[in-house]
Amino acid sequence: MKKKWMWLIGIVAVIGLLAIALVLKQVNSDEKDENGYDTYKVEKESPLNLEGKASPQSVKTYNNNSQLGTFVSTQVDDGQSVKQGDSLINYDVNNNKRQQLVNKVDEAQQAVNEDYRNINQAPNNSDLQKKLTQDQSTLSEAQQQLNQHDKQVNDSVYAAFDGKVDIKNKENVSDGQTILQLVSNEPQIKTTVSEFDLEKIKEGDKVDVKITSNGKTGKGTIKKIAELPKSYEDQLSESGAASAGGSGDEEGATMPSSNPVQSTPSGGNDSESSKYTVIISDIDIPVRAGYSMEVKVPLDSIKLPKTVLTKDNNVFVVNKDNKVEKRGLKIDKVNGEIFVKEGLKKGDKVLKNPKSTLNDGDKVEVSS
């Protein structure tokens, strides 16, 4: 019987010790919750990742222009690199036409000069003033015709920019048929950004670029962000193509407006987020047109988890001595995310889930 009681006492003692251990563990846990805080280190938002295709900044098509004269030959080879202003195409040009325009300009200028001499001798003669006005108008028109002729020659013969030649036809080229194309040396990347990320970027931002196929990396700059979403651009392009393909050449048909106004155009499917075209240029690595590209846009914005904010949008910043500074913030809330406009910088350490009883200057225990 005595042995049985000893067993019971032993069991009770063990249960008592376990109970005491549980109480002590709970007390220690409460103390840690009371004094030990997890922290969050302030970092800038992760880079914005985009994808796109490389393309030349400009491609100029040179068609056979019979108004200049008869096409003779190209003056460059296929694949040749040229500089702006280099001659690309040889025409048998009727130089008499330009000389005639030059003569008209000279004659009109002489008439204006004569008018000024006559007016100096008779400044109150209204007929001379009228004649001067008419002759000045004739001179302006003659200069405009000469300028248009020279512009047409430059536009049809000379390289508009530095680039590489892609010859399409060299012989038996009919009027209006493509002779060659000039592809600019400067590449660009066309990509899109969603409406949720649009406000995070701006023209002039520096970006990191990577060629997907070979892993080569470089730098670039955001040159342009479209004002209209891509759905608008696609719709307007289709509308323009439909107008161009209409029956304007048919007899009696009404010519479409060259500068149409589209009232309240549709912005696309209401259930889809809008995407905006972004052009990236000043790329510092060789990129062939059509290459798939990856783009990272570094962001300066600071995003915070909700757990670090007090009810009045303050945070407690911890210094190296584990003392806290209660700091007010200016924040923006976008799509449920919290962005800091003012009050924190990269590297600051703030408390998670700060107690309502915590005060500025208090010393805390930091658990992580």
Image (cartoon, grey):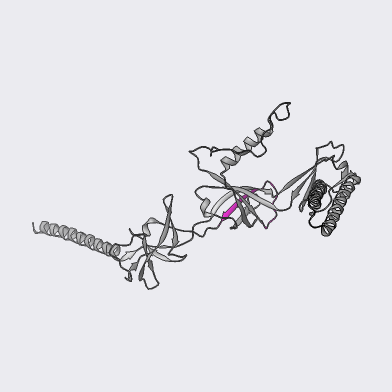
Q: Residue at x 86, y 52 (%)?
A: 111
Q: Position of residue 190 (x, y in %)?
A: 63, 48
Left or right of residue 2: residue 83: right
Classified by dominant secondary structure, the portion drawn in magenta counts as: loop
**Which part of the image, by quadrant, shows the C terminus?**
bottom left
Q: Position of residue 364 (x, y in %)?
A: 33, 69
In the image as oriented, which residue stretches furthest toward the bottom? 321
Q: Is residue 199 above or below residue 179?
A: below
The reply to whether the magenta stretch includes residue 100 is no
In the image as oriented, which residue stretches furthest toward the left? 1
Left or right of residue 92: residue 240: left
The reply to whether the magenta stretch includes residue 296 is yes
Name the foreground residue: 123 vs 185: 123
Left or right of residue 277: residue 160: right
Q: Residue at x 40, y 72 (%)?
A: 320
Name the foreground residue: 106 vs 239: 106
Q: Is residue 359 above or below residue 282?
A: below
Give residue 248's quadrant in the image.
Answer: top right
Would residue 154 be seen by someone viewing this image from the given angle?
no
Q: Which span is picked out in magenta?
A: 283-297
Give residue 29's quadrant in the image.
Answer: bottom left
Q: Position of residue 232 (x, y in %)?
A: 57, 40
**Which part of the image, by quadrant, shows the N terminus?**
bottom left
Q: Position of residue 308 (x, y in %)?
A: 37, 60
Would residue 248 be seen by someone viewing this image from the given angle?
yes
Left or right of residue 189: residue 147: right
